[in-house]
Image (tube, helix red, strand yellow):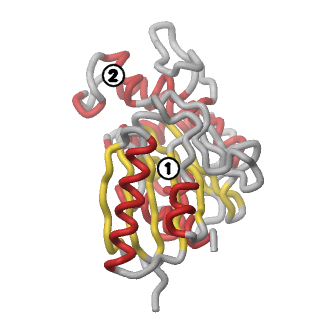
Amino acid sequence: MTKLFGGIEAGGTKFVCGVGNLDGEILAKTRIPTTTPADTLSRCVDFFEEQRAILSNFSALGIASFGPLDPRLDSVKYGHILRTPKKGWSDADLVSPFRDAFNVPIGFDTDVNGAALGEWHWGAAKGLSNFIYLTIGTGIGGGVMVNGELVHGLLHPEMGHIPLPKDDSAVSVCPFHDDCFEGLASGPAIEKRWGEKAEDIPVGHPAWEVEASYIARALRSFICTLSPERIILGGGVMQQAHLFPLIRQKILEELNGYMKLPKMDEYIVPVALEGKAGILGAFLLAERAL
């Protein structure tokens, strides 16, 4: 019998909960608004209780969450959200309510690492051992795989907070840094600078040259430090498909011939799993916890 896994893609706006398998099938799914930790997590537990009765018991649960968080198994803060701008969620324990309710192994990592796993197993990074997955939307985050393993260390990569050169008119929306990637190039940063949401800004608007420049500067740093075989770009901002050729051209300008890169439309690519990478990646986090 095919093993079933529970998965949670925990976001600042909504929690997506699902039950599925490693054939990529999502057998049940729901979306729960992110309110308070007690309310949100209780509703998630209720969903999995219902699905366990309908489908079967799941073997493990994976949680791919917004952060920053503590993914270190030997830490007293394992499974917790750390200091976050999301009101009420600093120090929230995401793992214990599910461990107490279901007594199954639980995998826990960042939402971007979860999505990176999904793209690696089924999507745009399939067959690769070294790649970067970046999401550019309400925030900016990155998952990194090196030699077939997700990168962890002190905590986890915070790729949205590398410093970038900025022009005089740029205003950062990050509450911690006035010059970071997320502060200058996230969806809220675009809206702050141009007075319109990204999805409402037309193709050909000067905003896109500025946005592509910031993204290319960040990718130059990642390419030179991590040497990825491919870079996958997702998130709400990257739904603007016209950004990809702009970024590819600006990357070549940034590197200025220093490194020989693969064919650019095969090197910097969009996500392949669209909105499913996070929940499918959570199933893989569950499987790795067994």
Of 209 and 87, nearer the camera is 87
Give the percent coordinates (x, y) of residue 275. 35, 56
Of 103 and 122, nearer the camera is 103
The residue singled out by tag 2 in the image is: 191
Above or below, 143 relative to 240: below
Q: Would you call the spot at circle 2 few (<14 residues within 10 Å), some (14-19), or many (20 or more)? A: some
Name the amino acid, label 1.
Answer: Ile
Q: Would you say the residues marked 1 and 2 are in contact, meaning their CB atoms lie under 8 Å apart?
A: no
Dot placed on the residue nearer the N-terminal end, 1 or 2? 2
Of 170 and 49, nearer the camera is 49
Which element carries disc 2, helix, strand or loop?
Answer: helix
Examine the image and state in which quarter residue 24 appears: bottom left
Total tally of numbered discs in the picture: 2
Residue 180, visible in the rendered structure: yes
Above or below, 168 relative to 232: above
Examine the image and state in which quarter residue 45 appears: bottom left
Q: Residue furthest top?
A: 168
Give the percent coordinates (x, y) of residue 254. 59, 32
Residue 80's tag is: none
Give the percent coordinates (x, y) of residue 204. 27, 28
Answer left or right for 69 relative to 206: right
Answer left or right for 239 relative to 91: left
The residue singled out by tag 1 in the image is: 268
Q: Would you call the spot at circle 1 few (<14 residues within 10 Å), some (14-19), or many (20 or more)? A: many
Q: Residue sitting at 30 percent across and 30 percent down?
A: 198
Of 278 and 148, nearer the camera is 278
The quadrant of the image that shows the C terminus is bottom right
Above or below, 74 relative to 39: below
Which element carries disc 1, helix, strand or loop?
Answer: strand
Q: Residue sitting at 50 percent across and 64 percent down?
A: 101
Q: CA distance from mark 1 to mark 2?
A: 25 Å
